[in-house]
């Protein structure tokens, strides 16, 4: 008898959707394609020799431990180093027992979803939003309320209006998810004032803040703004970060900083999920930080990505029509582009692929859809030559699209 497997899947599993970004990553491999689509670090930045040296150290000093199961919380030594870094670089007042290691920040998001979201619960996110977080929360059958971003990172008036509306219908959101620094996908950074205000609003309406921070170390200019977690004295903020953008995503190493009460729950969720984070990569990462390599590595990445950003900005300025809007991000890996409203980047995507250049359609970052005229460009992955060539190709596609649009306006039959 043929198994009707669909019938057996859980309701939750049937809600799982393919990530448009994952699908798009496939196009990177097409011959001749210049892809600004993925959110990939530049492989030329991977510190292969230093990592090799650290691996040798691990095998010399503690091979048995590195190849054994570890505790669910993660390596004490590594968490100790991270606690030091959190205090020194980010002004977050924490000790190692406020940190757990996760298999990437993405697992941290899933563990938070597992621990906080019941079916039908509501959470808030600023939009455009990191798609991976929306996917993780969606899997736990939660309802999403989108809060638009503004020039200070989140529209706080809209947030309070929405909170009041929800309160009138008896809904108290569990948390607000935000990437306050060099956000994926918009490249925007939340102002200091909005960070403090947001924490106050969270306290007034009694929800927690999930602060996802993979990019703040990749700052190209200006002054760093302290994370929201650094102002949190009441355990209202869960902070996540990762080695993916400052070392290598293949390590699958992230961490969560939170109060003990929250971490105890996340540890139980993690125990049920995967017992412990990759022990071997934790030992290698410890040797890497302890050996004093990380700061130098971050400087190297910043220099490389700033150069790439400058090239992309220079080419966009030169080649994109003036009706296309964008902002220069002060760090991170992405530039957000807004076309004239008449352009639908979903429809334009096939033309871009035909012209051997790829981007991510902006709509993918809005859980409720819309914003069809936007797109995300990644500048970390490509080299200078590809950035110049790719932006040229994209500019040609945009110009063609705009001129078709113009022709349609002239054509009395064109609707
Ligand atoms: C905002 C944000 N959060 C989390 C992640 C996932 O990171 P990790 O590789 O640590 O799972 C990413 C990856 O691109 C990201 O952009």
Image (cartoon, rainbow, N blue to C red):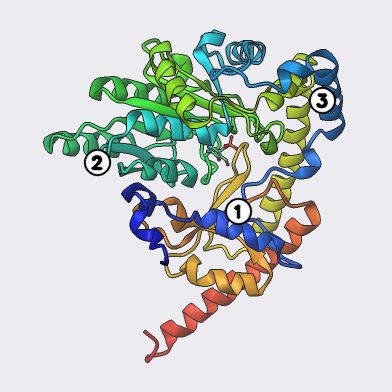
Q: Earlier in the sequence, mark 1 or mark 3?
A: 3
Residue highlighted by disc 3: 55
Q: CA distance from mark 2 to mark 1?
A: 34 Å
Residue 21 in the image, given as x and y percentages of width and height:
54, 54
Q: Nearer the viewer, mark 2 or mark 3?
A: 3
**Location of the N terminus (image quadrant):** bottom left
Residue 67 in the image, given as x and y percentages of width and height:
72, 23
Q: Is mark 1 within 8 Å of ligand 1?
A: no
Kindly state the secondary structure of the residue where label 3 is placed. helix
Res 173 → quadrant: top left
Residue 377 in the image, given as x and y percentages of width and height:
60, 53
Instruction: Identify the residue shown where x is 48% and y is 67%.
Output: 346
Q: Which mark is residue 377?
A: 1
Crowd rating for badge 2 (residues with CA inside 10 Å; few <14, some 14–19, many 20+): few
Crowd rating for badge 1 (residues with CA inside 10 Å; few <14, some 14–19, many 20+): many
Above or below residue 314? Residue 296 is above
Residue highlighted by disc 2: 120
Above or below residue 314? Residue 54 is above
**Location of the C terminus (image quadrant):** bottom left
| Front residue of this view, candidates 385 and 236 | 236
Kindly state the secondary structure of the residue where label 1 is placed. strand
Q: CA distance from mark 2 to mark 3?
A: 46 Å
């Amino acid at each position: 008898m043929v198994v009707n497997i669909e019938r057996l899947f859980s309701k939750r599993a049937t809600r799982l959707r393919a990530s448009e970004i994952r699908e798009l990553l496939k196009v990177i491999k097409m011959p001749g394609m210049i892809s600004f689509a993925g959110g990939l670090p530049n492989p030329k930045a991977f510190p292969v020799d230093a990592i090799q040296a650290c691996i040798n150290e691990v095998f010399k000093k503690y091979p048995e431990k590195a190849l054994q199961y570890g505790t669910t919380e993660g390596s004490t030594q590594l968490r100790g180093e991270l606690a030091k870094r959190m205090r020194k670089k980010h002004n977050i007042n924490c000790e190692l027992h406020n940190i757990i290691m996760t298999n990437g920040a993405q697992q941290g998001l899933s563990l938070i979803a597992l621990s906080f979201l019941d079916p039908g619960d509501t959470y808030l996110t600023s939009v455009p939003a990191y798609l991976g977080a929306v996917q993780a929360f969606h899997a736990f059958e939660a309802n999403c309320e989108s809060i638009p971003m503004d020039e200070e990172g989140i529209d706080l008036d809209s947030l309070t209006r929405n909170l009041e509306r929800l309160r009138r219908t008896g809904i108290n959101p569990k948390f607000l998810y935000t990437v306050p620094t060099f956000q994926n996908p918009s490249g925007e950074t939340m102002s200091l004032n909005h960070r403090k205000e947001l924490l106050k609003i969270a306290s007034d309406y009694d929800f927690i803040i999930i602060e996802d921070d993979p990019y703040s170390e990749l700052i190209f200019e200006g002054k760093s703004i302290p994370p929201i977690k650094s102002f949190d004295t009441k355990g209202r903020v869960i902070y996540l970060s990762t080695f993916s953008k400052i070392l290598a995503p293949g390590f699958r190493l992230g961490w969560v900083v939170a109060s003990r009460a929250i971490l105890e729950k996340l540890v139980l969720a993690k125990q049920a999920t995967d017992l412990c984070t990759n022990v071997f990569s934790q030992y290698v990462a410890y040797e890497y930080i302890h050996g004093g390599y990380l700061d130098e590595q971050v400087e190297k990445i910043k220099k490389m990505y700033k150069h790439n950003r400058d090239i992309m900005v220079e080419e966009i300025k030169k080649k994109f029509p003036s009706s296309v809007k964008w902002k220069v991000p002060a760090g991170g890996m992405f530039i957000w582009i807004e076309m004239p409203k008449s352009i639908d980047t979903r429809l334009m995507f096939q033309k871009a692929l035909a012209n051997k250049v790829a981007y991510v359609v902006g709509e993918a970052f809005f859980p409720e859809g819309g914003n069809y005229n936007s797109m995300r460009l990644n500048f970390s992955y490509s080299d200078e030559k590809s950035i110049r060539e790719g932006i040229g190709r994209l500019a040609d596609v945009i110009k063609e699209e705009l001129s078709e649009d113009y022709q349609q306006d002239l054509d009395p039959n064109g609707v």
